[in-house]
Amino acid sequence: MPTLGQNQYGKAEVRVVRVLRDGATHHVRDLNVSVALSGAMEDVHRSGSNAAVLTTDTAKNTVFAFAREHGIASPEAFAALLARHFVASQPTIHRARIRVQEYAWDRIPTPGEGAHSFVRAGRETRTAQITHDATGDAPEWETLSGVTGLTVMNTTDSEFHGYLRDRYTTLPETRDRILATDVTAVWRHGAATPPDADPAADWDAAWASARDHVLGAFARTYSYSLQQTLFRMGSQVIENLPGVDEIRLSLPNKHHFVVDLEPFGMKNEGPDGAVYFAADRPYGLIEATVLREGAPARIPADLTNL
Amino acid sequence: MPTLGQNQYGKAEVRVVRVLRDGATHHVRDLNVSVALSGAMEDVHRSGSNAAVLTTDTAKNTVFAFAREHGIASPEAFAALLARHFVASQPTIHRARIRVQEYAWDRIPTPGEGAHSFVRAGRETRTAQITHDATGDAPEWETLSGVTGLTVMNTTDSEFHGYLRDRYTTLPETRDRILATDVTAVWRHGAATPPDADPAADWDAAWASARDHVLGAFARTYSYSLQQTLFRMGSQVIENLPGVDEIRLSLPNKHHFVVDLEPFGMKNEGPDGAVYFAADRPYGLIEATVLREGAPARIPADLTNL
Amino acid sequence: MPTLGQNQYGKAEVRVVRVLRDGATHHVRDLNVSVALSGAMEDVHRSGSNAAVLTTDTAKNTVFAFAREHGIASPEAFAALLARHFVASQPTIHRARIRVQEYAWDRIPTPGEGAHSFVRAGRETRTAQITHDATGDAPEWETLSGVTGLTVMNTTDSEFHGYLRDRYTTLPETRDRILATDVTAVWRHGAATPPDADPAADWDAAWASARDHVLGAFARTYSYSLQQTLFRMGSQVIENLPGVDEIRLSLPNKHHFVVDLEPFGMKNEGPDGAVYFAADRPYGLIEATVLREGAPARIPADLTNL
Amino acid sequence: MPTLGQNQYGKAEVRVVRVLRDGATHHVRDLNVSVALSGAMEDVHRSGSNAAVLTTDTAKNTVFAFAREHGIASPEAFAALLARHFVASQPTIHRARIRVQEYAWDRIPTPGEGAHSFVRAGRETRTAQITHDATGDAPEWETLSGVTGLTVMNTTDSEFHGYLRDRYTTLPETRDRILATDVTAVWRHGAATPPDADPAADWDAAWASARDHVLGAFARTYSYSLQQTLFRMGSQVIENLPGVDEIRLSLPNKHHFVVDLEPFGMKNEGPDGAVYFAADRPYGLIEATVLREGAPARIPADLTNL
């Protein structure tokens, strides 16, 4: 008879927007929240008995109610509140994993004192995942933060040569190329305490700092390979954010090919620049984990995004 | 025997990136160009004879070669150069419509003198369409500019009431709601001259100004309906950009519903704000053209985006 | 003062699923319905007064109620019912355009007498658009049917040569290539009567026949250009469906390039076939209208899909 | 100093189409292949030295060359050939993971003897992943097969009741509902030998059989919860495919809500059926692994798709 392995269930992609009014000045948090619960779920799989099941509809309601009751201090803190609640509230639920995607808004400047107009900012999405595990088989709390869709490009200071050659190698070496990627990164906070434990912790500032270090490392690294750039991006975060023990980056190499214009009697690359074809597929894909020395590796290689 | 009606062909979505090097300072233009040609094309449809056909591969090559030869001063000017070339170069081609989508990049600040690192900016896409018609059946030049994916939200100053009621009406009236939309707009420049005719014309500044007026009108309008907001957005562009004769806006009403928390003994809306559910589908969709008084309406109602 | 041009509003993408139970045998119609209304809407744009506005929420409710009350005989007949209702029910509404996308389901064979299990069929979407206009400025009824996402490929019987050559032409001629496209087609029924007028009309059969003729023409045409294939597809529909007066096709040329394997000492093309690279962008895009002789051209060139 | 953790690189999404000509009858395999390589890659991350790196461009070339040289017997066998090659060919490469997505084509029936016209079939994608590991730290070969995008619906024989209730529970119980989902499944073959080892193995038949058992279990299970249906789907595969030791299923609960028509004086549900609103987000998400008794669990919980 087949046996049941790892399982989880919940409500995915609850789109909750919290508007906080401070007089005429409004503040917005715009989240996409996914709840995944595990526990004593053998029966529901075998017989369909829902006696141990808190419904996904209830999970959705809880997200909205908690946003109202507790506000959304940060994706990490909000997710921790939810995870703690689900595990504490039902004896059949032993583990809760809360994922959050957050969309950023900039203010539209307006005259007068009201401040309630916004325009969606940037192309990237901030992510977070809190796992609260009461089984004793895993750390009680795990906090991941991340970013996805952060598209960057260096138009020079990138070389690529000295690689292996075999029967199928045709790529010419280059001393100057465009290096462009869409950054997806997930980093793990080392602290064993949940993100809502310390009210003084500024998760927004920590996230902004990590993002800035990723951007800065990308821009400042003179690159001989995308792997090298990736490792610098990860190292920069580890070296500058003492609370971060591990980071995994997934970087598509968005190829920009110098167009061959010689058939038209034209030279493309020159001191004034060049014209490139931005290709879609296939693309290189570089993935790696960077760790604080001695820290355990806990971000799964298959967890490419939150 | 069936007859042939309107027809056009060309290469769509040529992804061309132009890097202009000014010493250590680099400038980027990142375009997606689509070419559509019409003319003496009866034979190719009836017999398959390609004698009148400039291939779509050649159209693609021309985009790259022109980006190198002439640079990309603006989407509008670049498209005009291409349109003029296709019509002038082949007697069988009588009309060229060039569409351009442009993706914006911000600089990543770095120490030192180099400036060649970029991060993709904003979520919106700038658009343009130049049609050059030598048939005599239409204006010789038509210049459209536009934007898509500009997501905006007002968290107050929006009411909705006083509407018709019939058997199927259940919507409660509201004196305070979120108003959010993804702006897609296309505006027509009245000038009969092509965008590359006047080297002093600043198409980038004109586009930025139109975008700012759209944003500003959205933010400053106290709204009783999305139609009213749309009309203010369009009017603001017409009133402030003397070169623009017509604008068409397509605004999905991105519904944000106040979550009913009463079953949990909670009051949602209050002086401190509220929690909303951001819905996907269905959505209201409001579309209209706003015209300078006396100007002809030329943007097709079915042209929802460039 | 700016003036108001063409405008329309309504609820878009109402996802309605109708299950009809005939004992243990169930039938499903799965639609995505979009309503666009026009009429005496000057006030709502200028002052925000909604006195002439039937809300988009009511439009949504009406779609659901009509699906229950009248059933969904076909996308065309259902859309006609809705269009007639909106124009008839409110003096301020003078025109209604209803778009429908339909998703097909196949039965999953099961033992026993129940028949209520389904699997989504095919990749294509059936489309329809009914416009009911009471202004007198346009035909009172216009019926369009269509298809999108119908992906087809011929692995031979396609040549491409004899085209114009200019300075930018590099494409080699070919006597044997893959021809592949995603068919989007919209065809117009000539009848001036609405689709719900004749209960004997079988709109499902008519749609299936048009789809079959499009597929058959694609497969049976020995092609010298995609334009020729397009014209055959359109002609086949015009010639075989007496009720159809006009069809517009939009065909991306999904390029499949023969991979150059000579650098590896291999010959790619041979009597046993070849290996191709299926490219994404750019792609050729061929669009044309085919008409019954003497029929007016009414499908807008900018209406690329329903 | 930061340390390097798990890392891999390669070319993703190589779109290779193989046409095999058997006289006038053509056969097509249409794949999307992604290569991920690991090994002695410390240097390229630290210094940017590419001395140990086989470029992703070479990986792409190899995919095309192997499709020509060896043909594509099945996604599994083709991936195994590639994995074996990469690990065998370079001492610095110790592990190769090849992912394949395959798109299905049906024949368009045509008169005469030629058979070279195709239409894309179904909405689902067949998937496979072969991992060849020469490090000794993992099984030398691991073979996964799967499916994604298989959308199914039962219009009855689904109940939902007897679940936990807390402060946030409002969902009414139901004795009859629509149950619909998009199946994503990944199953692991127990054999320690690579898929290309046994020329008699029919991977296409095995995949079709697994798909049929998933469909059949969905259709035939009278369901009290989606978890129960999931477990039956997984068990059916384990019980009927002796080579499969483990399967993981990820099932979104695509909610179809009975529309409340009482405000319009209408009863929705009846013996003749009902009208439903097909919702987008949020959705329930049910994920679980089903194992052959005694088999190890090796499919990562975070590997939601191939």
Image: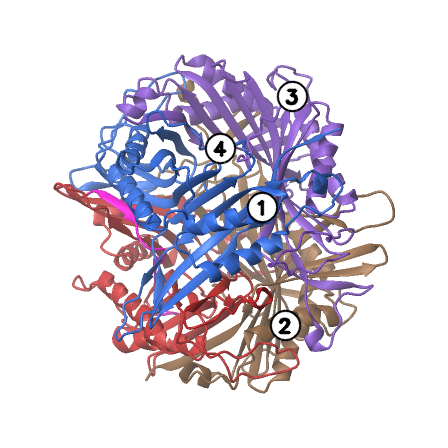
Chain colours: A red, B blue, C purple, D brown
Q: Amino acid at mark 3?
A: Gly
Q: Over which residues does the magenta segment extend?
A: A116-139
**Mark closer to the observer (4, 1):** 4
Which residue is the site of mark 2? D61
Label 1: few (<14), some (14–19) or many (≥20) C-alpha neighbours in 10 Å: many
Decide if residue D119 is on the left or right side of residue A257. Answer: right
The percent position of residue D27, horizontal first and vertical second, equals 77, 57
Image disc number at residue B302: 4
Q: Secondary structure at mark 1?
A: strand
Separation (CA) of disc 1 from disc 2: 35 Å
Image disc number at residue C190: 3
Q: Are marks 4 and 1 in contact (CB under 8 Å)?
A: no
Q: Chain of mark 2?
A: D
**Mark closer to the observer (1, 2):** 2
Q: Amino acid at mark 2?
A: Asn
Separation (CA) of disc 4 from disc 1: 32 Å
Separation (CA) of disc 4 from disc 3: 21 Å
Quadrant in which the C terminus of chain A appears: bottom left
Q: Are marks 3 and 1 in contact (CB under 8 Å)?
A: no
Decide if residue C196 is on the left or right side of residue A158. Answer: right
Q: Is residue A121 highlighted in magenta?
A: yes
Q: Secondary structure at mark 4?
A: loop
Q: Secondary structure at mark 3?
A: loop
**Mark closer to the observer (3, 1):** 3
Is there one chain holding both mark 1 and mark 2?
yes
